[in-house]
Image (cartoon, grey):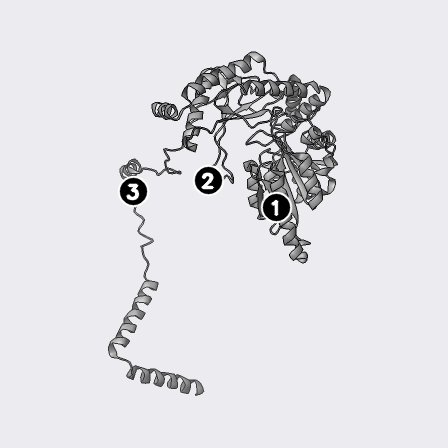
Amino acid sequence: FELMMAIQSILEGLFEGFDNVPVFHVALEVVLLMLVIWLVMTKSYNPNDNQELTDKEKQTLIDEWIPEPLVPPNEKYSAKYDKVVSGKFGRYIEINNFVCINFGVHNYLCMNENNNVIKAAAECLQTYGMGSCGPRGFYGTTEIHLKMEKKLSEFMNCEEAVLYSYGSTTISSVIPAYCKRGDVIFVDERVHFGIQKGLLASRSQIKYFQHNNVDHLEQLLKEQAEIDAKNPKKARVTRKFLVIEGIYQNLGDICLLPELVALKNRYKIRLFVDETISFGVLGNTGKGVFQHFNVDVSEADLISGSLEHALGSVGGFTVGSTFIEDHQRLSALGYIFSASLPPMLAAGGLCALEEIEKSPSLIQSLHDACHMVHQALSTLNHIETPSAPLSPVKHLFLKSYLQVSWEEDYSFLKKVVQKCLMNKIAVALSSYLKSEEHFLPQPSIKIIVNNRLDRAEVDRLVAVLQEHVVPFYTPANIHKALSVSK
């Protein structure tokens, strides 16, 4: 009875509401309600209507179908490989069926042609197979990985080493493993792209100092000290790092390590040194920039390096104290999530390192070749190099007293590289991601030195460069050369 009374009360309220509402409004609501009910109840298609197409209709549809490309066409960039290599990357290199003198590949000690290294890698291939097929923490660690890490730590006079699968991603994985949001990183403005990506991933505050300018770095450190003095509580939890290279990839010059270490100790900041180029190059026995300057390696909190340049293998590594190295095994993305270095490449790198230890004359022969090439390149007109005499990487820049744009500079040097290749000399043109580089370097020709070059080969390089640079090096001739090539 109470329920009936409640329903009657509700209905009376509705009818009283309708009395106060225009008729067209009520009619519209009724129509909309019926439309909603119709849409809900009505199927958009008949599931039983499953008419089969004839073979002719199917073929017509197939013939008319034009698939869209997965990637939009881009005429500016091409995936065409105009330099295809056959055979080993050694003192000579075969490109497009032409044997060229090799000035274009990072193979400083020609280890990939060393018979002992080849034998060690081949024997390891028979034992472990092609790849490890798993990260280091998930059945990707083999005995050869542990031997390589032990040998690296002993060679560099450090407590421990960590081995990575790729040289280029080592430092970009290491930096964000230690540097986090709120930290401050002081870094040379000319560091290579891998370091820049690590800095970006760290989300730290980045303070660039002018290249190899110790005074500018100290100015930034003083400014940071003043900021810390104003807020001591925040300063106690703000970690500060200094990131440099032993030999800078984009210039080929050597860092000012003793002065940088002095600032590191004075302002109590952590020092990371990337020795991708300098490992196996600098120092009497190839131990890098610390041996070169006779600075104790313990001054660095972490050193990273590559197996891909002096050792002729693949992969990267870091060395440091046990405390520092253990942290990477849980925090460095390139170590945790990448399949470990194929054992045969670790075995080849291990043998190459042993070859350096047995024959320090390999390092001296590389130093002699670097000096010889540097002296020869210094005779070129209209070309300058900031690279150090001991650096195996020589960057050749067009002198800046004639004004040409970055694009014209790049295009002209590209033509010079092509002329060199036509004369059976392989050199490289430095390439950069213009929109992503913090400091876009000027275009340059990159000359890579190996320890087996002789005077005749170096003189041949200089003669070809002189022939194809000097006659054209005026703005008018550069414009003309580029217009003809187009």
Give coordinates of residue 411: x percent, y percent: 41, 28
Residue 435, label in figure: 2
Give the CA separation, mark 3 to mark 1: 75 Å
Q: Quadrant of residue 458?
A: top right
267 vs 179, nearest the viewer: 267
Tell me the mark number nearer the camera, choosing from 2 and 3.
2
The residue beneath circle 3 is 53
Q: Nearer the viewer, mark 3 or mark 1?
A: 1
Query: Which circle marks residue 220 in the picture?
Result: 1
Left or right: residue 108 compared with residue 19: right
Question: Which amino acid, mark 1?
Answer: Leu
* Disc 3 secondary structure class: loop
Q: Position of residue 410 (x, y in %)?
A: 44, 29
**Label 2: which secondary element:** loop
Q: CA distance from mark 2 to mark 3?
A: 52 Å
Q: Name the disc covering residue 270, or none.
A: none
Three-letter residue code for mark 2? Ser
- 335 with respect to 481 (left or right): right
User: Eyeballing the image, is 82 above or below 73?
Assistant: above
Identify the image quadrant of the C terminus. top left
Can residue 196 be seen here? The reply is: yes
Task: Answer left or right for 97 relative to 365.
Answer: left
